[in-house]
Image (cartoon, coloured by chain):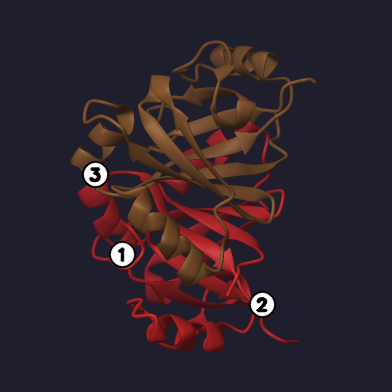
Chain colours: A brown, B red
Amino acid sequence: MEPTHIEHIGIAVESLEEAIPFYEKTFGLKCYSVEEVRDQKVKTAFFKIGQTKIELLESTAPDGPIGKFIEKKGQGVHHIAFAVKDLSTRLKELEQKDVQLIDKTPRKGAEGLNIAFLHPKSTFGVLTELCEKPEK
Amino acid sequence: MEPTHIEHIGIAVESLEEAIPFYEKTFGLKCYSVEEVRDQKVKTAFFKIGQTKIELLESTAPDGPIGKFIEKKGQGVHHIAFAVKDLSTRLKELEQKDVQLIDKTPRKGAEGLNIAFLHPKSTFGVLTELCEKPEK
């Protein structure tokens, strides 16, 4: 199921209002989109570096996944996302290889992508997301 | 100082012997190099996904930076590395912007790159590395 590229790196931050200007002024990147993903209780901000996006994640509620992550581990890299083709088939293959899936079937993520998360217990501590561009 | 791409993602693992076959069999990636970086007390294994490398890091000593990281936080993403041009100038610019540098001048990293780390206190919890391909 070789991934084609790193689709994005998700970074948990306490405040987009502070983190966005930092990424813009310090690294010269441009925030091209801010989006709220309500069912994940996050606001996201996107930057592009080559093939890969940086996705800053701010929790909109303390009991959301990013709120809990920051409480436990502090700000930092939350997940990495591989771009793959034919996500449904990839998930079935991974299940057959005994990889623990958080999402057994694709669901909608930010930017309209089809996404699924693998459990970090199965992936050496790295919360791993697979992303697929939907057919138009 | 806009980075051109994500050069690599560094992932701390307890055992390369276990993690390499996992990345190969599960994600269909090919480990193309294993290298020891003695002054960092690590053994590294490299995989390529598009423009970006996955760098698995196994500590060769409990008191090395990766050994300490795993003891404190467990296995997982350790750092992300941006590819930049003219690294010495970039470091001077960052210092002027009050970014805390771990390496004030470039040093040699894995794969012969010139590298420098920025302190995660200055970068919203993300240990960030800048990498430059040396002039031949």
Which is more foreground, mark 3 or mark 1? 3
Residue at mark 1: B65
Q: Quadrant of the C terminus of chain A?
A: top right
Q: Quadrant of residue A126?
A: top left
Q: Is residue A119 left or right of residue B88?
A: left
Label 1, residues with CA under 10 Å away: few <14, some 14-19, many ≥20: some
> What whole-number distance in Å separates the C-alpha atoms at marks 3 and 1?
18 Å
- In the picture, the disc for residue A63 is none
Question: Which is more toward the observer, A12 or B53?
Answer: A12
> What whole-number distance in Å separates the C-alpha atoms at marks 1 and 2?
24 Å
Residue at mark 3: A73
Q: Secondary structure at mark 2?
A: loop
Give the amino acid type for the residue marked by disc 2 in the picture: Lys
Q: Position of residue B132 (x, y in %)?
A: 61, 77
Against B120, residue A34 (above or below) is above
Give the amino acid type for the residue marked by disc 3 in the picture: Lys
To which chain does the residue with label 3 belong?
A: A
> What whole-number distance in Å separates the C-alpha atoms at marks 2 and 3?
33 Å
Q: Is residue B19 left or right of residue A92?
A: left
Q: Residue at x 56, y 62 (%)?
A: A29
Q: Position of residue A95 (x, y in %)?
A: 55, 13
Q: Is residue B127 left or right of residue B27?
A: left
Which is more foreground, mark 2 or mark 3? 3
Q: Residue at x 73, y 39 (%)?
A: A4
Could you confirm whether marks 2 and 3 are on the same chain? Answer: no
Q: Secondary structure at mark 1?
A: helix
Q: Inspect this view and state whether residue A47 appears.
A: yes
Residue at mark 2: B133
To which chain does the residue with label 2 belong?
A: B
